[in-house]
Image (spheres, rainbow, N blue to C red):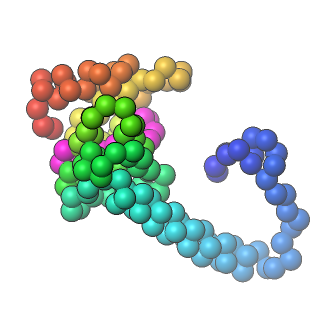
Amino acid sequence: MPVDSTHAFASGAAFRKPSAPPALAAWIGSRLAALALRSQVARVWQAFEAGATIAPGCRLGPSAWCVNEGPRDRIRIGAGSVCRGVLRRETFGDGTLILGEAVYVGDDAHADGGAARAAGVRFWWIDRGLGGEPPAVMDQRLTSVRGVAHLLGAHGPA
């Protein structure tokens, strides 16, 4: 169950018990939820196609997002990669964000560590100091993205 700003600030709607039969209401709700998910996935792909070059075979999660304040080719996603998180390239500097082939970018350290391991790729957790338990499955714990380039050179492709 998502908890968002409408929940946190009690500004969301509250409803009476539906007058429709529960099975019908559930059926209609599931169809509307599926339609909303398809719509969100379309918006995600639109954002990525506007801000990145994407090789064939990539997959994007419904909560993924791409922000690129520069030329589209400054974010490149390799074939077979999966992105469930946020890719962001700011306006300062001339940096380029490149995800190689079969890279997995997640949004939940606990769920994604197991998914990365199951896919046969290394899982590096970038600990942003937000607290909580570290994931049980990880190959490397980083406190900054600054060490990623060095690790990629040292380890080579997965």
Is 51 a magenta residue?
no
Task: Return the x and y of residue 158 as percentages of the image width and height.
Answer: 15, 38
Magenta residue check for 106: yes
Q: Is residue 136 visible?
A: no
Up/down of 27 relative to 119, above or below = below
Q: Quadrant of residue 153?
A: top left
Q: Which residues are magenta?
A: 100-111
Is residue 55 depicted above or below 71 in this figure?
A: below
Q: Is residue 61 left or right of residue 76?
A: right
What residue is shown at x 26% (from left), y 57% (from top)? 54
Quarter of the view holding residue 95: top left
- Picture residue at 25% right of the left edge, 26% below the top: 148
How far across and down, in percent of the image, does residue 92 sit? 37, 32
Residue 116 appears at what percent x and percent y?
30, 42
Q: Is residue 99 left or right of residue 132?
A: left
Asked if residue 2 shows in the view, the reply is yes
